[in-house]
C-alpha cells in the first residue's frame, strides 16, 4: 500500500507579482524550488495565508536568486503582491518502509523570500 505524504514545502513565501495574461503556473525562484526538491512542472497545492484561498497549479522556475514568487493565469486572481503563501507538493510512499523514514524538505522564508531556516 502507498500513502501520500508531504514531500516539499515552502512556508511563508511572499508573492512578488501576478500575471493574469500568462497561461498558468506559479513561478518560483529556481534556487528556492531546488532547495526543497520541487521539480519544474511538478504539481503543487498552494494555500494563501492572507486570504484563505487554496488552489492547485504547477511549478515553473524563475531566475535563480531572484526571490520571485509569481502567480500566473487563473492563480493571479487568487492573490496579490505581499500575500503570504504555503507551497506544498506530495509524494507516494510505501506505507511501512518509506513512510517511517521520510522527512519532507521544508524551508521558511522571510520578507524578501530569503531562507530563514530549513526544517
Image (cartoon, grey):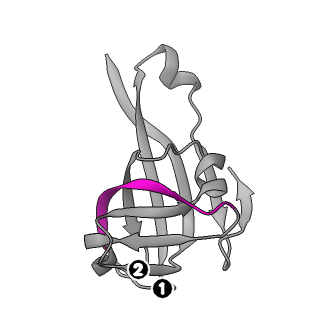
User: Where residue 17 sits in the image (x, y, percent)?
Assistant: 47, 81
| Label located before the other in sequence (1 or 2) | 2
Question: What SS does tag 1 mark?
Answer: loop
Check if residue 55 falls in the magenta segment. Answer: yes
Q: Give above or below for 38 relative to 91.
A: below
Seen from the viewer's position, the closer of residues 87 and 75 is 75
Quadrant housing residue 109:
bottom right
Q: Give above or below for 9 relative to 65.
A: above
Q: Residue furthest left?
A: 74
Q: Are marks 1 and 2 in contact (CB under 8 Å)?
A: yes
Quadrant housing residue 68:
bottom right
Q: Residue drawn 25% across and 72% down?
A: 74
User: Where residue 82 sits in the image (x, y, percent)?
Assistant: 51, 85
In the image, which residues are magenta? Answer: 53-64
Seen from the viewer's position, the closer of residues 23 and 94 is 23
Question: For mark 1, what is the residue?
Answer: 81
Seen from the viewer's position, the closer of residues 91 and 26 is 26
Amino acid at each position: 500500500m502507498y500513502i501520500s505524504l508531504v514531500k516539499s514545502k515552502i512556508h511563508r513565501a511572499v508573492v512578488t507579482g501576478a500575471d493574469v495574461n500568462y497561461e498558468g503556473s506559479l513561478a518560483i525562484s529556481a534556487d528556492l524550488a531546488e532547495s526543497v526538491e520541487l521539480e519544474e512542472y511538478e504539481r503543487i497545492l498552494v494555500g494563501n495565508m492572507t486570504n484563505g484561498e487554496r488552489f492547485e497549479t504547477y511549478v515553473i522556475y524563475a531566475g535563480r536568486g531572484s526571490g520571485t514568487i509569481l502567480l500566473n493565469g487563473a492563480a493571479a486572481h487568487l492573490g496579490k503582491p505581499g500575500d503570504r503563501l504555503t507551497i506544498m507538493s506530495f509524494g507516494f510512499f510505501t506505507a511501512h518502509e518509506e513512510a517511517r523514514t521520510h522527512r519532507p524538505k521544508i524551508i521558511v522564508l522571510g520578507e524578501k523570500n530569503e531562507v530563514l531556516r530549513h526544517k
